[in-house]
Image (spheres, rainbow, N blue to C red):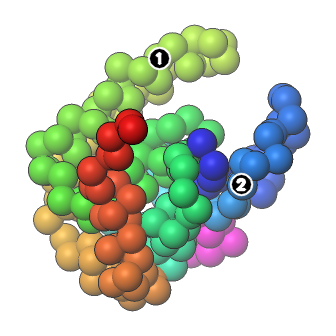
Amino acid sequence: MRTVVDLRNEEERGEDVAPRPAALRTIGIPLDQTDDREFWDDWESGPQFATPLYYGPHLHRFPTQSAAVIAAIANAPAGGVAFHCAGGRDRSGQIAILVLALVGVAESEIVADYLLSHERLPAMYEARGEEDQTPLLEEFLRSRGTSAAAEIRALLRADLSHSLAAGGLQRQDIAALRMRLLAAPRQPT
């Protein structure tokens, strides 16, 4: 691991629990632009923020942020790259969806990957002593006549490349991302 992209807002970040290795580069790119109250007053007014319902509108409103994260992943120095938010489903989920789509992963695989968070997040909530939000979010989506899987499919059927290009993502960034993730691993000598 050589690069970490931290998607959290500045006010969410705290001190590391242990010193980071000197060779580990951390890049802070807050995915949310919380000062845009016109957008966030609507999206923070209920559980819709913690669902894929907001991914498309977020990408449309803030393409620069997603493009910057993808470019940082694509152009990081040699070595592993990790990206994270606070929980691993929403901001990280949105970026994972975009990255996987840009390198040509099948829609069904991207949806399945996202849905793994429904299996893994309950342990995080339990460790934090918090109530698992998954049932609430699933019910919220059902009440809107949709599901996480349906919303991700809808996002994937949009012109993601156009949105990301509007945010500044260059063709060479996509080529670098594909090279990083799809290049054949070197065989040991």
Residue 35 painted magenta: yes
Q: Is residue 9 visible?
A: no
Could you say which quadrant of the image residue 182 lies in?
bottom left
Question: How many marks can you see?
Answer: 2
Q: Is residue 51 left or right of residue 77?
A: left
**Residue marked by disc 2:** 26
Q: Is residue 35 above or below residue 52?
A: below
Residue at x 33%, y 84% (from the top left corner)? 171
Q: Amino acid at mark 1?
A: Pro
Give the number of the mark in front: 2 or 1.
2
Could you say which quadrant of the image residue 56 lies in?
bottom left
**Residue marked by disc 1:** 122
The secondary element bearing badge 1 is classed as helix
Q: Badge 2 local density, few (<14 within 10 Å), some, or many (20+)?
A: some
Q: Nearer the viewer, residue 32 or 162?
A: 162
Quadrant where the N terminus sits is: top right
Residue at x 37%, y 82% (from the top left corner)? 172
Q: Is residue 157 left or right of residue 71?
A: left
User: What span is in magenta?
Assistant: 32-38
Image x and y of residue 168, in percent? 46, 86
